[in-house]
Image (tube, rainbow, N blue to C red):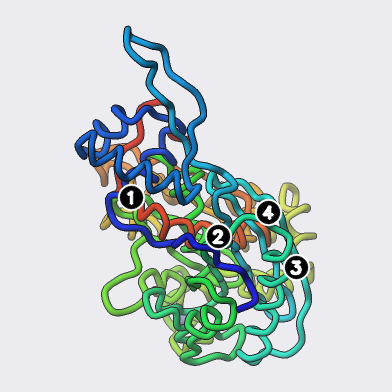
Amino acid sequence: MSVRPGSKRLIREINESLVLDALRVHGSLPRVEIARLTGLSLPTITGITTRLADASLITEVSQGPSTGGRPPRILALNPAGGHVLGVWLSTGRLVAVTVNLVGEVVDHYASTWRGRSPAAAERAVAAAAKELGSRTTSPVLGMGVTLSGVVDHDAGVVRHSGLFGWEDVPLGATLSERVGVPVTVDKLVNALASSLVLYGEGRGVRDMLVVSAGHSIGLGIVLGAQVRHGLGGPTGSLGHTSVSVLGGDDSRPCHCGARGCLETVASEWALRAEIERVCGLGIDEAAERAADNEQVQRVFAVAGRALGGAVANIAKVINPERIVLGGEETRLGPAILEPFAKQLHHALSGATDHDIDVQVVSTDEQTWAYGAACQSLTKLFQVSGAREPDGEGA
Ligand SMILES: [Zn+2]
């Protein structure tokens, strides 16, 4: 084992997770309030909080006002009581972060690596874990890894990754063995969704769609404040749902073998090819010139509308409170975001019983790594789906 796992476990018993999650959501609480929020008895809470304090996962932060007797002790998560690692793995490059128990990034690491084989990737991730693990005095409780591909989250297996050329790679088990802590593996958009649920735009939101638009188009589905992974397989192959924007024989071939997939119109690789073909420009250059170039506007508008329409179809089924769009394409700005939002709102008007809030978040390499760390933290909190009090949601 190259990382000291410490005496503390990532996965706690259910009632311990309930208490930890109440403190994650509310910050600091007296025991009597934890009992009220979790529905557990005060003696049970006293036993649990004693165990969690012995494990350094929670700490006493202050004393509340006295109502005559002894003032109540206020408890909170102990930020340094445990750390988790998050790794964004791409071909030739890797970014990793260390995150504390209150969701703060306390360290980060980036490296390049050669080759595309699972063995080379595992070596690179293990080296990152060893380096970050050696730089913290807190016990490392777990690690999350995120990458582009179809991932069986429960099994920790990368079923398919076009980017890496992998089929059925048991990355989670191999890395757990190698690094010595529990390792979760998930696709990029679910890592993003995990961070939004714990600490971002998903706080206090029960049902949410998270869409990432970049090299591929990913969909994360959050129901009951939990990222859903589907029954027996991966959910959210939004990029390979078919769109009829071009229709008929104009539909383009997709790398998945089908024709007319959303990715053939709205992914970054499709946009690059189309912008190059129509305008002879690079994609970022095109985005900068979009305001006064109608050709560029048309290409981006087709992509944005296709994405908006596809997301609207899913939203009509799921009926979420919020839709969050992230991914590299958000950097392209209003040229793609405005047609996306317009099409989405148009398709949803009158289709649901409430207004669906739409937000755009910017994402970079560290965002994905942070999301991977949050996948791991989710195991600690086993987020119960409890609603947050008014005013605390982002
Ligand atoms: Zn496809």
Residue 174 in the image, given as x and y percentages of width and height: 53, 85
Q: What residue is shown with label 4?
A: 331
> Residue 352 bears which disc, if any?
none
Q: Residues within 10 Å of mark 2 (few under 14, many from 20)?
A: many
> Type of residue at label 3?
Cys
Res 373 label: 2
Sequence-first disc among 4 and 3 = 3
Q: In which quarter of the image is residue 41?
A: top left
The numbered disc on residue 279 is 3
Residue indicated by mark 1: 16
SS category of the residue bearing label 3: helix
Percent position (x, y) of residue 272?
69, 71
Q: Where is residue 26 in the image (x, y as percent from the top left)?
A: 41, 33
Q: Closer to the observer: label 4 or label 3?
A: 4
Residue at 61% over, 86% down: 164
Between 24 and 328, the residue placed more toward the observer is 24
Pointers 1 and 2 in contact (CB under 8 A)?
Answer: no
Q: Report how far apart the C-alphas of labels 1 and 2 lie in the structure.
A: 20 Å
- Local secondary structure at mark 4: helix
Q: In this view, does 162 lie to the left or right of 67?
A: right
